[in-house]
Image: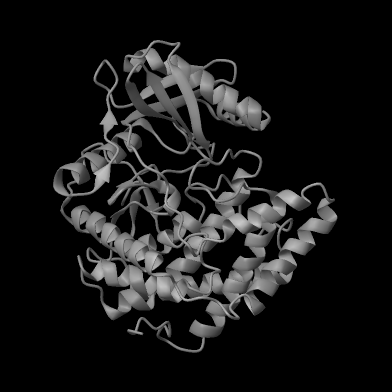
Amino acid sequence: MPFRLCLCVFCFPICSREVRIMSCFRFDSLTLDGKIAHFTSVARRALPLFGFPEDANLKLLNFTENATFLVTFGISKVIMRVHRLYYTSVNSIRTELSFIRYLSKHTDLTLASPIPALDGSDVVTIATPALEEYRQVVCFSFVEGKAPCPDCDSNGGVGDLVAKVQKLPDAITYPAFKEAARLYDKFGKIGAEPLSEHDVQFFTRMGRIAATIHAASKEWKAPDYYERIEWDIDGTFGRYWNNFYGATYRNRKWLKDDEIAVLDRAVDLLKERLYRYRRTKDNYGMIHSDLRAANLLVNGDQVAVLDFDDCGRGWYMYEIAGIVALLEYTPQLPEMLLAIVRGYEEILPLTQKDKDEIMSFVLMRRIGMLQSLESRIGSVAAGEGESTELTPQILEFYAAGTVVQARQYLETYAVKPAASFAFAER
């Protein structure tokens, strides 16, 4: 049976149950500024272990789940990642780095290379007595570039609107953003422009990148210390969810009972379809799982793939869903998926069954992202590539949009045994 990494604070092996509960509580009770200060303190203590003086410059690049810093000293630059609590283990991180090194050696992908500490270890653990916790820290080579922004990404516009209305009472803004999601679904496709040539090329390239990772994963031999999460049904909906920290789409703060019921029915249908799709050596293996634009850097013609911290075993078509995460609502979604599939098939073949289930994985990824966003409210400092800040209003918009997508999934897939999403040439 594959190793499953449980996020439940009752299962983490480093310290006692009581200490785990209290350390989570202490960290969660900090303000956003307090959390950032805590991460910065951990990073600064780790600097000498990687050969940097404690007064080296630390610049926070982003804090979503982990905290990522740019370390500079003289002409030296490295990236330092301070890990979130109780999501991973030392062996799990070592497995991630082993996979990155394999990809670096056996593909033409541009990646940030792991940098070991002075003692040769890939992962250092920093104890923080004040919060009674342990933080894992790793370093990577610095890669030049900027995060790409597809022309079809209009999340920034939603963020601009949120910034203008944040001073209004939540009782007004929450229903307004929920209704906005429904109105966008009804009228947003009217007069919508086709996918730009720039975006066609971008998503085609993303398909090639995904297939390159998957082709390598079929040949990669897992190390003896292998530990990674599984991006399967239980990883999203089961007891051992991956990175949602107990958050669930059944939270009545964001959705009404009838909306939760829609998601429940869609999840049941999704599970039924994926059980029939099965897991085989051809459709399931190591994936990046989060190939969004925010995890890429573009420098001229070069595209670097970053942030493998969510990599693990999963369905290869789940990777395609990850590419369009947060873009599912756009009217150009079918064109995006078509471009991704075209690029993918330049490297690896896909069966019709693979293509038939892509929309199942898009919904699975969407619901997983909803739960992940819910768990991160108040704990996000977005960096480059994130087109908008995470606010309750954004979550309200995203939750309502998820229900809309679930209804569409039920209407399309419940009446036919096979998927009707067309990947025909246009």
Instruction: Where is residue 215? Give x, y as percent.
Output: 20, 58
Image: 277 above or below 373: below
Instruction: Where is residue 375? Give x, y as percent.
Output: 60, 46
Q: Is residue 165 left or right of residue 77?
A: right
Observer-nearest residue: 218 or 238?
218
Q: Quadrant of the C terminus?
A: bottom left
Q: Is residue 361 left or right of residue 251?
A: left
Instruction: Where is residue 312? Give x, y as percent.
Output: 34, 49
Q: Quadrant of residue 83?
A: top left
- Which residue is drawn at the image coordinates 28% and 52% (left, top)? 301
Q: Is residue 222 left or right of residue 258?
A: left
Q: Is residue 107 left or right of residue 405?
A: left
Instruction: Where is residue 178? Give x, y as percent.
Output: 72, 65
Image: 141 above or below 127: below
- Which residue is drawn at the image coordinates 38% and 52% (left, top)? 230
Q: Taking the image as drawn, is residue 135 in sight? A: yes
- Which residue is drawn at the image coordinates 78% and 52% (left, top)? 165
Q: Taking the image as drawn, is residue 18 in sight? A: no
- Which residue is drawn at the image coordinates 79% and 57% (left, top)? 173
How many numbered discs sit on the rendered protein?
0
Image: 340 above or below 118: below
Observer-nearest residue: 31 or 143?
143
Colouring of the image: one colour
Observer-nearest residue: 34 or 121?
34
